[in-house]
Image: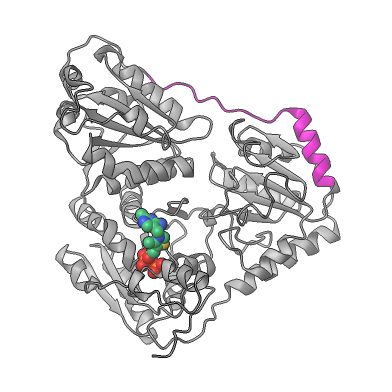
Amino acid sequence: MAETLAAHDVDLLYCVPGESYLGLTNALNEVPSIKLIVCRHEGGAGFMAAADGRMRGRAGVCVVSRGPGLSNAMVSLHTAFHDATPMVMIVGQVERRDFGRLALQEQNYSRLLSDITKGVIEVNEPVMASEALARAFHLAESGTPGPVAVVVPEDLFDAEVDAPVDLPRAMPRSGPVPEDVDQLVAMLAQSQRPLVWVGGTLRGDGVAAELEKFSVEWGLPICPTHRRPHLFASDHPNYGGYMGIRVPPDLLNEMKKADLIIALGERVTDSVSQSYSFPTAPQPQIPFVHVWPDPNEVGRVFRADLGMSCEPQAVIRALLARKAPAVSAARRSWISGLHAIHLKLMEPVWEATSDGVNFAAVVAEIGKHLAPDAAVTSDAGNFSSFIHRYIPFRPGQIFLSSVVGAMGAGTPMAVAAALRRPGKQAIAFVGDGGALMTGNELATARQYGVNPILIISDNGRYGTISMHHHVRYPGRPFEDATRLTNPDFAAWAETFGAEGITITDEGEIAQAIGRAFIAAKDRPVVVHVKSSAIQMSAWRRYTPPAG
Ligand SMILES: Cc1ncc(C[n+]2csc(CCOP(=O)(O)OP(=O)(O)O)c2C)c(N)n1
């Protein structure tokens, strides 16, 4: 199995050790090309593997023990499944002779993981182990990418077999059929106001440059979707706005004047479709083209006018091979109108806050320090709205997060980014809630000598939930359901051997953030920001009732 992993180019293997797979860690002694990264919680290990899968476009790999280990890791499988991220999770199972006896930590993984994996492969014959892993990689990476679990009984790891290592299988890539390209060309020719949404399965060598060329030659506004802001340069004149959760009304109202939506490699979830209202599900109110590398996904929720089950990059290439019509004046003004709204929304202006730092000011300052190849990760929470509003992302940078909104992803994903991209910036944004869910992976960063920067927005509560409470039950008290008593996060950081920095006032931001980037040259950094709770998000403020 160790050799099969190496044959699949696995070089980092995330784990929390377990007695159920000792045979594998023992065998890894003989495969030095694989580095084992021992984490502090299986949720952290799983999020690191998911981040690795997204960065490489190949399955990230995680090994966990049965029962409690796998249960801890499930949050990452859920994330990878929804996010269409390739991932392989190896699970050490009870010995074969004990199957079904409810032996220590035994679980039925085919049942348990059926809704959060693409497949569960149970290996019961040693001779099948290599083949099972090769199949798992293939399943994880092909079609709609996703997580696959490989369940291996403890005794099987020690069995001697004479079986060849199963090699990686050729990845089938599908292109568009010519008739569909003709139809798309005709739809584009008729459209005055198209929108192109780009999402997570838009991938492949050179895709950023091709997308840029496509947008210019065909006169198209490009809108990165929820949590994919790095797919198109925010300052490019064809950038048509960020299609995230709750698009601000000024931008959304303009977007709704579109007469064609082309979703390229975007599933079009409720987050992106503004709760299935744009486009409306199941019947889109405007012509809708859906491109996704899997026929089971195209047409699953929306009745697309044109459904193309192929690689989104192949569609871009097919259109670049055709002659684009001249870009009309109407089209130009549509694109520049959208872009102007986008620029206006991104302007670095914010109101003063009296109960702590406006997190907008911190995020905008970090944006100034980001290298062209920086990795930025985000946990789930309202603080992330500032990232999408105030950081002008561009290709070359990478943004990692749980698109399905799992708290706890931000810190481990930054550790994984720092491990995968040595010497490059890795910045995690987390809330005070998420910070203590997986912040312990700072120890993993220390252990392996990588230096992510964690920016913790401490507003003293699970702020997102406060906001939802406030919106849904106006006038009703909600503080007790969401308030948090927090540690001194800078002091907490120091106990890991990280640099701890605290920001309590806007006047301190520039100096503190500058110091953070310098300190990260030789150790991890935690910046504890005492954030305003009144500034609930980048778009919404709250006025607490008197008294
Ligand atoms: C693992 C997990 N548990 C619970 C939730 C529900 N949830 C979404 S946002 C949020 C609060 C986040 O609080 P914090 O990290 O402090 O960030 P803030 O919203 O205050 O900016 C919660 C509890 C979730 N998304 N993921």
Would you place residue 41 above or below residue 236 in this image? above
- Percent from the top left, x then y, of residue 28? 19, 29
Screen quadrant of the N terminus: top left
Would you place residue 20 above or below residue 420 in this image? above
Asked if residue 291 shows in the view, the reply is yes
Q: Where is ligand 1, by quadrant? A: bottom left
Residue range highlighted in magenta: 167-189
The picture quadrant where one finds residue 102 is top left
The picture quadrant where one finds residue 172 is top right
The outermost residue toward the bottom is 547
In front of the other: 239 or 263: 263
Please tell me which residue is depicted at 17% across the width and 17% down the height of the picture: 97
- Percent from the top left, x then y, of residue 213? 68, 49
In front of the other: 545 or 342: 545
Query: Is residue 138 found inside the magenta-colored segment of the image?
Result: no
- Percent from the top left, x then y, of residue 76? 36, 45
- Percent from the top left, x then y, of residue 536? 46, 75
Would you place residue 120 above or below residue 246 in this image? above
